[in-house]
Image (cartoon, rainbow, N blue to C red):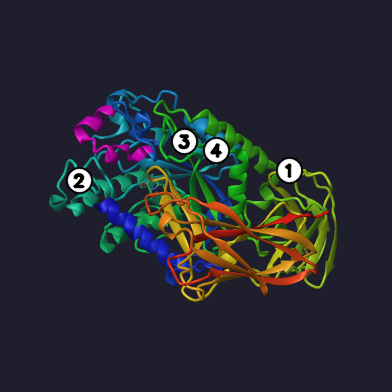
Amino acid sequence: MRYIKQCLLNLLVILFLSEHLNAQIIDMWDKTISNKLQSEKTQWFQDAKFGLFVHWGLFSQAGGEWKEKRFYGVSEWMMQRGKIPVAEYSKLVEDFNPTKFNAEEWVNLAKDAGIKYIVVTAKHHEGFAMFKTNFSNFSIMNTPFKRDPLKELSASCNKKGLKLCFYYSQNLDWHEPNGGGNDWDFVEKNKDYSSYYNTKSIPQITELLSNYGPLGLIWFDMPGGISKEQTQSIISKIKKLQPNCLISSRIGLGLGDFRDFGDGEVPPVPVKEPWEAIFTHNDSWGYSKFDFNFKTVQEIILLLTDVVSKGGNLLLNVGPKGDGSIPEVSVKCLLSVGKWLQVNGDAIYGTTYGPIPPQPWGVSTLKTGKLFLHVLHWPKNSQLIVPGFTGKVSEVKILCNNTPLVWEQNASTMTITLPKEIPDETNTIIEVLLTGPLNESYFDAPIVVSPWYDHCNLDISRARNFGNSKIEHLTSSHYFGDWKHNTCATSMQAPADSISYQLNFSEVGDYKIILEYSCPFENSGQEGLLKFDEQKFYFQTLATGNYDNWHPLLFIQQTVSEVSIKEPGIRKITISPLQNGKELFKLNRVVLTPIHFN
Ligand code: FHN
């Protein structure tokens, strides 16, 4: 019940936030925090850009399997999903002996991957302490292993100059009669949460802050109904013991030193305050025997690029096995990302969000004196157009091989001539050396559409909404807890409920216009209208399946029109229902694909 309440609460927060996401740089929701956030205290965090999350606990031993029953989705929730009694679940300690754990190897891997901080689960919701504690017997010290891995990690991190950070679930504790979340062994109304905070949660947090040297941050999670007083007392404790230790926003109540978005969520537009996107390498946080949906090296590089171009950090999770080894697929991927960062790190670390809005070729990042253009799609005519650019430039070169490039500037457009051969298919970074400040052009400029790219994706976050239509942030999970997020145009039920895009066609050419949307069975078959300036195109929606918070939002791509651009310039696309009816669809994006172009 509390979990469902928590999810509903999360949903409300997401809905509230999504109101503010559209077409503007997000300002922090709490100005009182925001001043504090800009302090020097968070500078290391804002510069770091890439962190390693490690979900490791007793759940890693089970790997999502209990008595031949397989729990698909996030494996660390197995105890809760299977309503496994404490007495039975606790037996996992008897076999938990992670002899393959080697702190130095983990830290070396993180260093080689270009990671700047590591966040390890000290206690997850199952209540098991992965460290030596005087406040519970349910600890790694009472397993055959009898070692404190956090102590060993602290020593290795110290030696190698990596920031050590701990995850601590401050409210959920399925092992304890007074902890949050376990309603199968314990009766909710008999719980004394204060007693739990005072006898386990706060004392263990105190141990973590006292026994492992300076911590970069403490990563709290799922605060639930924790009171303001209790939250304040945790914060005071941290401030007293380690004033420089940062606190994640999941401490709750709008507090914390930096903002964590939802699991697997990247905001559609840049955020100025310190923030973090939290992703796991596959779909589960804890090791799962059944989850092979690992992201490729290219996907991780693109994700990191997207996050950093919006001013955030990527906290990427791996799930070590019960034996203490990190799955090889994650090790190999991290090492490859690290190789890429060795060459391209200047455009990632210490940067802020890009001042140039996303272009058909990609995104940008910025640091003093340098603008970095991340070319994710190579223009077929080798001309890289940077609109809305008025900076003074002394040099332009390719970051990975130092090749100097020729550029031209006129009015507010810079054009760079690229080589025919693509140096890095995933992300070739162009370094622009600046001799003066840049003006921010974010969202002022219409979206550039050019026939020199395979596709031009029009993100919904860059559309304007009219009537009752909304740009909403939607969340759903495929199995359980593997959250997926999509920003969509919703509530389009009448002709006046439209969305529109301003587009700047750089050249003549013909295009297919494709709508990517989700539509439940009962809403399908309705008619919509796409207007391209004054040209009208009618279409009928197709069913993709029903969706709610617990069932995935599935999308289809439907071609609805073909247009011919005879002269370059500004055009407008408007999409709306043709008649009054049910919601037309949840529109995720519009794609323009060039055709018949020589
Ligand atoms: O319930 C947890 C989940 O197991 C995992 O720890 C993630 C990581 O952000 N946090 C919670 C859900 O948001």
Are there few (<14), some (14-19), or many (20+) residues within 10 Å of tag 1? few
Q: Residue furthest left?
A: 190
> Which residue type does callout 1 highlight?
Asp
Residue at image position (76%, 66%) is 565
Are there few (<14), some (14-19), or many (20+) residues within 10 Å of tag 3? some
**Is the C-beta separation of discs 2 and 3 under 8 Å?**
no
On the image, the x and y values in percent for residue 166 come to 41, 45
Q: Secondary structure at mark 1?
A: loop
> Which residue type does callout 4 highlight?
Ala
Residue 183 shows which numbered tag? 2
| Magenta stretch contains residue 312 | no
Q: Is the residue marked 2 within 8 Å of ligand 1, measured from its CB?
A: no
Which range of residues does the magenta coloring cover? 75-92
**Is the C-beta separation of discs 1 and 4 under 8 Å?**
no
Residue 155 shows which numbered tag? 3
Q: Is residue 336 above or below residue 370?
A: above
Residue 246 visible, this angle:
no
The residues bearing labels 4 and 2 have C-alpha atoms spaced at a distance of 38 Å
**Is the C-beta separation of discs 4 and 3 under 8 Å?**
no
Residue 424 shows which numbered tag? 1
The earlier-in-sequence mark between 1 and 4 is: 4
> Which residue type does callout 3 highlight?
Ala
Residue 110 shows which numbered tag? 4
| Magenta stretch contains residue 86 | yes
Q: Secondary structure at mark 2?
A: loop
Q: Is the residue marked 4 within 8 Å of ligand 1, measured from its CB?
A: no
